[in-house]
Image (cartoon, rainbow, N blue to C red):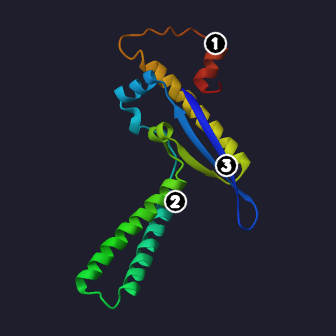
Amino acid sequence: MDILFKREQHQKNFGGATFRLWAKAEFTDDELALVDRYGFRSALILDADDTDLRRIAGGIGIAAAIAAFIALVIVFRDTFLLFDYLIAMGLSLLIGIGAGYWWFNEKRERLFMDDLLFGRRFKCRSVIDLAKKEAEIENVCGVLRQVLETAKHWDGVETIPIPVLPHNEAKEVVLGIR
């Protein structure tokens, strides 16, 4: 498995810069076969609390739906019948759902296997955020690589010996100090 990173920098209109990172994991044929065999394609790789993000996306969706409905009514006000208002409401609802989903998908921190398979773009506010995101993706891919390696041997039985630790080390392990 290899990770492909593409970095971009764009200047903002009023100074400052926006950084974009595009990341994609390139899998070997054997790794892709394991991904398909065990149904990893839709797996959640990195979880995040997106509650506030969902709330904001819902607000953006509602605002977009209202704006679309008003725009449709203003543009076609002379030719609208009752049925046309229902169509405009339905179309506005679709536009609102699409806008909310698009915004949520652009801002979400959750990482799915499909994001790694097909690539995903991340917006970062600073170079430090960009470096943190790269490190996070590298760590996740490292864990994923080990899971795929382990998946090669999921058939069968494995015995793993657990050594007896000296008293002080065992105490640290039990207390969670280590």
Q: What element does badge 1 sit on?
A: helix
Query: In the rendered image, which quarter is residue 17 located in?
Result: bottom right
Numbered circle sitting on residue 8:
3
Q: Give the residue type at disc 3.
A: Glu
Pick the residue in front: 168 or 14: 14
Q: Counting other residues with Cα less than 10 Å from the Cα at mark 3, is it few (<14), some (14-19), or many (20 or more)?
A: few
Q: What element does badge 3 sit on?
A: strand
Q: Counting other residues with Cα less than 10 Å from the Cα at mark 1, is it few (<14), some (14-19), or many (20 or more)?
A: few
Q: What element does badge 2 sit on?
A: helix
Query: Marks 2 and 1: in contact by CB < 8 Å?
Result: no
Is 82 above or below relative to 136?
below
Pick the residue in front: 75 or 158: 75
Numbered circle sitting on residue 167:
1
Pick the residue in front: 48 or 73: 73
Does residue 38 appear in this view? no
Query: In the rendered image, which quarter is residue 172 located in?
Result: top right
Q: Nearer the viewer, mark 1 or mark 2?
A: 2
Q: Quadrant of the C terminus?
A: top right
In the image, taking residue 1 as reference, residue 96 lies left or right, namely: left
* Mark closer to the chain start, 1 or 2: 2
Residue under label 2: 52
Q: Counting other residues with Cα less than 10 Å from the Cα at mark 2, is it few (<14), some (14-19), or many (20 or more)?
A: few
Is 42 above or below relative to 107?
above
Question: In 3D space, how far apart are the residues under numbered discs 1 and 2 (Cα atoms)?
Answer: 47 Å
Pick the residue in front: 60 or 88: 88
Name the spot of residue 30 as percent of width and height, x first: 43, 21
Is 55 above or below relative to 127?
below
Name the spot of residue 16 as percent of width and height, x first: 75, 60
Residue at screen point 68% across, 47% down:
129
* Mark closer to the chain start, 1 or 3: 3
